Each structure stands twice: as C-alpha cells, then as structure tokens.
Image (cartoon, rainbow, N blue to C red):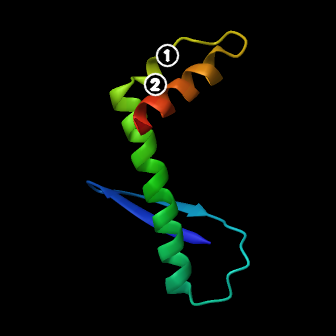
Amino acid sequence: MIESHRHIGDKVTIDRRYFICSLKETGELFSKAVRRHWSVENELHWVLGVSFREDDSRIRRENGAENMTTARHITLNM
C-alpha cells in the first residue's frame, strides 16, 4: 500500500493505493518502482492531453477512439 498526503491550504487529503507484486525487496525499492511507473504514465498522458487535446475529443463511434489514439501515439513517437 502506498499512502500519499496532499496539502492545499488548510485542507489535507489522503490517498491510499494498493499494489500486487512479487517484489521481495525493501519498501524503498518498491516506492521507487511505483514512482517510476507513474512518472512515465503521467508524462505520456500530459503530452497527449496538452498537445492533442485528447480530453476534448468527441470521437465516440465504433473504433474511432482507438484509431485516433493509435494515430496520436504514432505521431508522438515520430
């Protein structure tokens, strides 16, 4: 379990996330692995959201959303 605390003004929110893994090392190594994973995820989604305005996309029919996601990822990797 990872517990994070967020302080905004006088308000504190606590978020708990649970993970399943076979890692038998220290808690420090586990924490680093979790941070690396979310760092990659957040950076990718931020770029897609800002560069391609992905969150504003209205494509919903059939395979359109999946096709556009593939096209955005290809464009990003170029």
Work out whether residue 74 or residue 8 is closer to the camera in this orientation and state it. Answer: 74
Task: Give me the residue at 46% from left, 67% from top.
Answer: 35
Label ID, residue 54: 2
The part of the image, by quadrant, that contains residue 49 is top left
Q: Find out whether the residues at labels 2 and 1 contact each other: C-beta distance under 8 Å.
A: yes
Residue 57 relative to residue 6: left or right: right
Q: In which quarter of the image is residue 26?
A: bottom right
Mark 1 element type: loop
Viewer-closest of 60 and 7: 60
The residue furthest front is 78
Q: Mark 1 points at which residue?
A: 57
Side of 30 where 63 appears, left or right: right
Q: Where is residue 12 in the image (x, y as percent from the top left)?
A: 39, 59
Local secondary structure at mark 2:
helix
Q: Residue 22 carries which label?
A: none
| Amino acid bearing label 2 | Glu
